Image (cartoon, grey):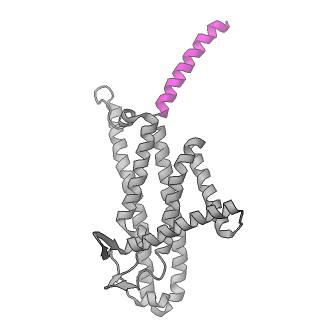
Amino acid sequence: MLQTFASAGPHIEIKAEKLFNLGPIPISNSLLLGIVGYALVLWLLFYTIKSIKQGKKNYLAGTVMMIYEMLYNTVLQVVGDKRIAKKVAPLSISLFFLIIVNYWIGILPIVGPITWNGVPMFRGMVADMNVTFALAIISMVVVQLYAIKTHGFFGNIGRYLRNPIKDPAGAFEGILELIAEFSRLLALSLRLFGNVFAGEVLIVVVGYMTAYAASIALLPFMVFELFIGAIQAYVFFMLTTVFIALGMVSHSHEEGDHKSDHSSADTNKQVPAAG
């Protein structure tokens, strides 16, 4: 299989390619493999739930549970509130499993040599920039929703838009915060796409250059890409969690100052009474 993959020749295309139309919907090679990836993630999670309910012990369900618990504990540490962590964790952890599964199946030998009208039939879903941008948009929209829930609609807008006359430093800080939101969106999407695309190009080029020795030469690179896929999924999961936490605590220092002022005032009032 690896030799067939190597002999297929390098086919490098930065964008996903259309295979056919399903009615008005164009089906690309990344969408086709992405459907397989989605199905695998859903099967994996439902299989784990079923195994837990039935009390069955196996390595697959145990590994998924171990990873889930580890990621949930990370969310809890970042957010700091168990009630909020239970609401944030499903999104962040689902993104982790979605990215890592689709990353891993995107480096299988079937990706490349199998073609449809001269176009590779399969392409990793997260090697499609449209997908990485969509995942990043979902993350940042959720960040804003939690920020609005915490600070209120106008309170959240106040993080970015402040009176430049009354608070020039705050107005400048708000502009920087607004720029930061867009930079986070770009960072989430482009980092993931760049790493996935670079990994696929590396494997294709190494496989083509080594030809009949690809069975040996590609194995260490594929193992390395498995490791990189896990790292990229964890980074996306972690950044999503951190951005949500930042959106909810962005005004905490101001509230802390008010609380400390009130506390000191109360202390000053209590000192004479104690005397």
Residue 175 x %, y %: 32, 40
Where's residue 34, x and y in %?
Answer: 43, 70
- Residues rendered magenta in the picture: 250-275
Residue 164 occupies which quadrant of the picture? top left
Q: What residue is drawn where x is 62% and y is 51%?
A: 73
Query: At 43% from the left edge and 63% from the top edge, which residue is drawn?
Result: 192
Asked if residue 157 lies left or right of residue 44, the reply is: left
The vertical placement of 15 against 133, above or below, is below
Tell me the quarter of the picture where residue 64 sits: bottom right
**251 is within the stretch colored magenta:** yes
> In what quadrant of the picture does the C terminus appear?
top right
Secondary structure character of the magenta stretch overall: helix
* 77 horizontally vs 99: left or right: right
Residue placed furthest toward the bottom: 212
- Asked if residue 209 can be seen in this view, the reply is no
Q: Can residue 225 be seen in this view?
A: yes
